């Protein structure tokens, strides 16, 4: 843990989504597949054919997508920390609204 100061590590709290993350990821990948694909395409990968969430925490998620040539991915940040299932759904809807409005979304794709 050389990148974290020991005092910060001791003071850190558990991510509020830790217990729910796997179920939320499954839900997003099944019920929000088109939304995830829209995000991948809107964030600069128009050739994306499939997109899935692989990790999720209060600050955002890792989006993996498939193009005709490769599989790649990156991090997409929520506009603010989320605390529960409802916040995750609202956070994803908020990201789509930003994309549709032509506003920037913080990401590493």
Image: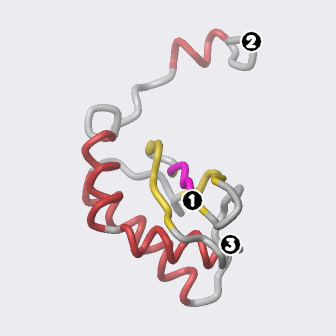
Distance, label 3 to label 2, CA atoms, is: 34 Å
Which stretch is magenta? 61-65
Closer-to-camera residue (70/21): 70
Q: Residue at horizontal 40%, vertical 26%? A: 14
* Label 2 sits on residue: 2
* Label 3 sits on residue: 45
Q: Residue at horizontal 71%, vertical 74%? A: 44
23 sits to left or right of 9: left
Query: Considering the image in quadrants, where does the C terminus appear?
Result: bottom right
93 sits to left or right of 47: left
Residue 88: x and y in percent read 35, 58
Which callout, 1 or 2, points at the residue further toward the start of the chain?
A: 2
Residue projecting furthest to the right: 2
Q: Are marks 1 and 3 in contact (CB under 8 Å)?
A: yes
Residue projecting furthest to the bottom: 101
Distance, label 1 to label 2, CA atoms, is: 31 Å
Residue 99: x and y in percent read 57, 81
């Amino acid at each position: 843990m050389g990148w974290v100061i020991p005092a910060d590590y001791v003071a850190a709290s558990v991510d509020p989504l830790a217990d729910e993350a796997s179920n939320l990821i499954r839900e997003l990948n099944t019920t929000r597949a088109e939304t995830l694909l829209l995000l991948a395409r809107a964030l600069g990968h128009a050739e994306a054919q499939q997109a899935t969430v692989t990790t999720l925490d209060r600050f955002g998620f890792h989006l993996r997508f498939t193009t005709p040539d490769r599989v790649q991915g990156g991090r997409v940040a929520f506009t603010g920390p989320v605390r529960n299932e409802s916040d995750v759904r609202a956070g994803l809807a908020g990201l789509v609204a930003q994309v549709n409005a032509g506003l920037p979304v913080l990401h590493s794709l």
